[in-house]
Image: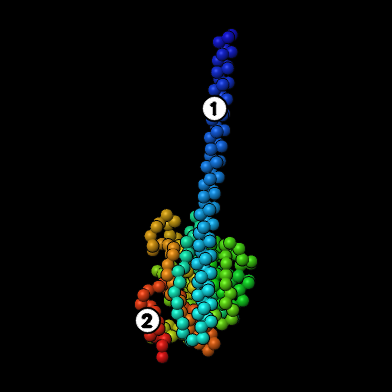
Amino acid sequence: MPEVCNMNKRASHEMMMMIGYMLLGAIMILAMSGAIGRMISGYNQGKYQQRAKSFNTLCDQISDLLANQDEFAQSEVTLDLEGDFTKGGAVLVGFSDIYGRSEKLSTRDNKAIIQPDYCSGGCLCLYSSPKSWSTYGKQNKDVVCRDFGAGVNFITDMREADFNYGELMTDYEIPVVSEDPNHSPYYPALVLYGQKPGAMANSDSPKTYFRVREIYLDKQQKDGVNYIYFAIYDGRIHQQREKAISP
């Protein structure tokens, strides 16, 4: 009988030890999960602040171009489209005032982007990811916009190779001067992706991610209407655009 009691005590002791180890393991897993969660949250908050600062600088540059009384003015700015940890790249969208109020844009990968309710004219919006396009009520951390008012339009020659996926705006001929004398009067809408659609999330190729790049901007004014032109910065583009537009 004493041997049976000793065996029961050992089994009970081993069971208690096993339960203790399991509880300790669970506590360690929870602690690690919490630490990882805080790291990801801190990473995302840092990325959000960098994007917001870059976006505000871009908008301020555009405001300066619009305030310039000359019919043509140009500038360049650094644009940050780095995405959050789990969302891929951010997206820059330009809603033009071409139609009075551009309520919806189409993309080359067959998506529709609804203009936020608080945009009344030409409006530039930064989305944390394409998943935020359905957010068109009030501003929040997933979408921030700057409304430039009536008569402001955003145009570009950038296509998929340059991360722009806006559809060609074929309903309106845009009367701006181009460095290419044979340029079509139609331009793509500005829908600049931080990560190309369908790209592998773990691919670190510069052909996959926009990340942080220099952007060329210029303004042309025609009959009281302003056109803000976007391009990825190239040292030659200043001279090309200025030469084409100068009388």
Task: Say what amino acid the circle numbered 2 marks.
Answer: Gln
Residue for point 56% across, 82% down: 151
Relative image position of residue 230 (x, y in whole percent)? 45, 75
> Residue 227 placed where, x, y %?
50, 81
Name the residue rendered at 49%, 60% in the picture: 83
212 or 2: nearer the viewer: 212
Residues 44 and 207: in front is: 44
Between the residue at mark 2 and the residue at mark 1, the CA separation in whole angstroms equals 75 Å
* Residue neighbourhood size for the residue with mark 1, other residues' Cα within 10 Å, grouped as few (<14), some (14–19), many (≥20): few
Q: Is residue 28 above or below residue 72?
A: above
Q: Amino acid at mark 1?
A: Met
In the rendered view of the protein, which quadrant contains the C terminus?
bottom left
Q: Quadrant of residue 156?
A: bottom left
Mark 2 or 1: in front is 2
Residue found at x 50% / y 62%: 50
Q: What residue is pinned by disc 1?
A: 18
Residue 137 in percent (x, y) is at: 63, 67
Q: Is residue 187 visible?
A: no
For label 2, the residue is: 239
* Position above or below: 30 against 194: above
How many numbered tags mark residues here?
A: 2
Evaluate if marks 2 and 1 touch, with contact meaning CB atoms under 8 Å apart. no
Q: Quadrant of the N terminus?
A: top right
User: Farthest residue in the bottom direction?
Assistant: 247
